[in-house]
Image (cartoon, rainbow, N blue to C red):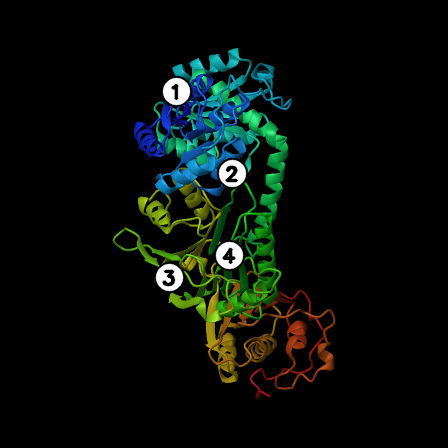
Amino acid sequence: MNSSDIPRALIVDDNPFNRELLKELLKLEGFSVEEGRNGKEALEHLKESGFRLIFMDLLMPGMDGFETILRIRRMGVTTPIIIVSSMTSKDDRQRCLDAGGNDFLPKPIDTDMVKSFVKQYGTCTPENAKNAEPQTDDSLPDSPALKFSEYHILLVEESDSLADQYSRFLKNLGFEVTHVFNGDEAWELFLKHRYQFHIIISNVFTSGMDGLGVLARIKRDYLSVMMFIYARDNDPDTFQLAIQLGADGVVTQADFEKSIIDLIDSAIYQASQKGSRTQIASTASQVRKAQAQLIKFGCPEPCNSIDIAYTSLTDAGGDLACCRRFNLAGRCGIMLGDVAGHNVMSSYISAISLGILTSHWDRHQNPMGLFKIINAELNKSDYHQYHLCATALLWDRCRKKMKIATAGNPGGLLARETAEGPLNFRELAGGGMCLGLLKEEHLFLSEEIEFEGETCLFLFSDGINKEDIIEILSSGNVPLKRKNIRGLCQEILDRILEKSGQDDDMVLIALNSSPSSCACSNEKGENSALHYEFLSDYKSADKACRWIGTQCIPDKIPRGKDPCFILLAVREALINAVRHGNKFTSDAFIDLSVFFEAGELRIEISDEGPGFEIPDTIQKIENLDVLQPGGRGLSVMYSIADTVKVDGGTVSLIFRKKLEDQRPGGPLTSYPDPFGENE
């Protein structure tokens, strides 16, 4: 065979071992091979020789793979480019294709995939930059036409000498440059003037928040800002993590002045190819705002029991996470779900699932019952191509008991402080079949658990590894024991992003079983209420009413209030809870909480039912037989108490200090016996 007939391939990789392995595989397929250690050498090879295939690594010092591919395509070379990288997320693959790559070869290299690419792409006509027809796309900007004076750079560097060197270099090119010493200063300054800075260039290693930490925060909320990372040495793992976090370019200090302008040029070019960078950021922001509506707290007021944090990929998510308070005594429900896929339709299916959940949640507080309802809906023909991985639980905080069900999601993680110091971890079983995948409902998993001592339960989507949570909590850098649980999940997520990057949507939920999280505790974590509980029957309700009577002595109740009328209103609320709330269910609890405050008495009666609406018109008490032993219900409560509130399965009766001898609803002419016989 004439040497000119031998197909040629170009391998571009800074790792000699990777080049050698791929070289041997291509030789077996009949190729002669040339090698380049970086993007600059690759471009030189393409000026002199024609190739049928190019294998391109992504993470290289100086000009990285993304930049090199863009420049190859600008040269007019259409040779198939196979990206070789361990960055295998959907986002990374799409970025490679957007840059001009043809296909993706993940590391470690698979011999059969190399053969497949040779067969698929190895028959193209060899070409080089000299022979290629120039590209005539008027939308491609020339570097000299860029007005660097329009861009303001925030430079993050601790070394004064290095900062002076880079600042002079960038200012000579026309950039406006502001220098700060570390990531904490950079983040604080950026938040104060976030519309002022267009580009951030940071050393990866700085005190306080490092460069990767700044990168993670910037790319989470401010996609219109370009960010570049540099380090003294070429560290592929660090650079790969930076790219996964969304860096627009990575470079070593040795190549900074040779390559940073090319990287900035490339980032601006990519934005111009996709449209306005501001418009892209605005669209992404709108998607994230919509996604945020699927991941939220169920209560408007702060809660020291549940924390939720999430971070989604640039494209639409599909995750849902929400909590719901069923009563004020600490009965809550939580749902975490992840629809297969990462597109707008995934978010739509999540919204459908959330709508089903919220419309049935109050009446079906059993996690398995909820799964059956959602599964039946997703099995309909309109949605049968989608399935939902989910975790649902019913949490009784005051009793530290929980019913939990999983359908395709990872199992939870229990973390508990021990007297010896180190945390104790217990992994809960996960798995089961996804909702909407099969009609067989018995394939979902369920269990009941009890908390021991002060424990946190973590639930998470499959974008998070429980090993990362264990490592972060065990390190002590994110303390588990804290006054307020809010912010715990975001701290853990930030640590995971800085360490491992992100290749899927990530949702993390934490539940705190410490005494300060109980519904009967005040903001300081102190138990400010007297508490009584009983199982649903009328005799137990009478005992509870007598217990209330021992607490509501004249010296403690608001001035002008009669204990007999207070007990009458309470008894009606207890009867309502037994009969209508718990429907005489023998193993269902009713909780009483009594709060004595200045000039006010508040009594909360919580059952396990869905609650009710207070009607606009309530029958006046003077139209009732007050001696009737029960059945007077809401009218008696409303007439005797100054205020009646219903919050889910909790009825609150509020009695206030009386200014004059008058009572809502008019006077009662006789004192009824609150302990009369039940109907």
Residue most toward the front? Answer: 1
Residue type, label 1? Gln
Q: Secondary structure at mark 4?
A: strand
Q: Earlier in the sequence, mark 3 or mark 4?
A: 4
Structural distance between the alpha carbons of marks 1 and 2 = 29 Å
Q: Earlier in the sequence, mark 4 or mark 2?
A: 2
Question: Can the viewer see residue 159?
Answer: no
* Discs 2/3, front: 2
Q: Quadrant of the N terminus?
A: top left
Q: Nearer the viewer, residue 613 or 410?
A: 410
Quickly name the residue at label 3.
429
Question: Badge 4: how crowded within 10 Å, few (<14), some, or many (20+)?
Answer: many
Question: Badge 1: how crowded within 10 Å, few (<14), some, or many (20+)?
Answer: many
Q: Quadrant of residue 122?
A: top left
Structural distance between the alpha carbons of marks 3 and 4 = 16 Å
Question: Can the viewer see residue 256?
Answer: yes
Residue type, label 2? Gln
Residue type, label 3? Ala
Q: Quadrant of the C terminus?
A: bottom right
Q: Residue at x 61, y 35 (%)?
A: 280
Residue type, label 4? Gly
Measuring from the top left, give residue 344's x and y in whole percent. 60, 48
Residue most toward the left? Answer: 420
Report the disc number at residue 337: 4
Quickly name the residue at label 2.
94
Structural distance between the alpha carbons of marks 1 and 4 = 44 Å
Quickly name the residue at label 1.
253
Structural distance between the alpha carbons of marks 3 and 1 = 47 Å
Q: Earlier in the sequence, mark 2 or mark 3?
A: 2
Q: In this rendering, would 3 be left or right of 91?
A: left
Q: Nearer the viewer, residue 336 or 76?
A: 76
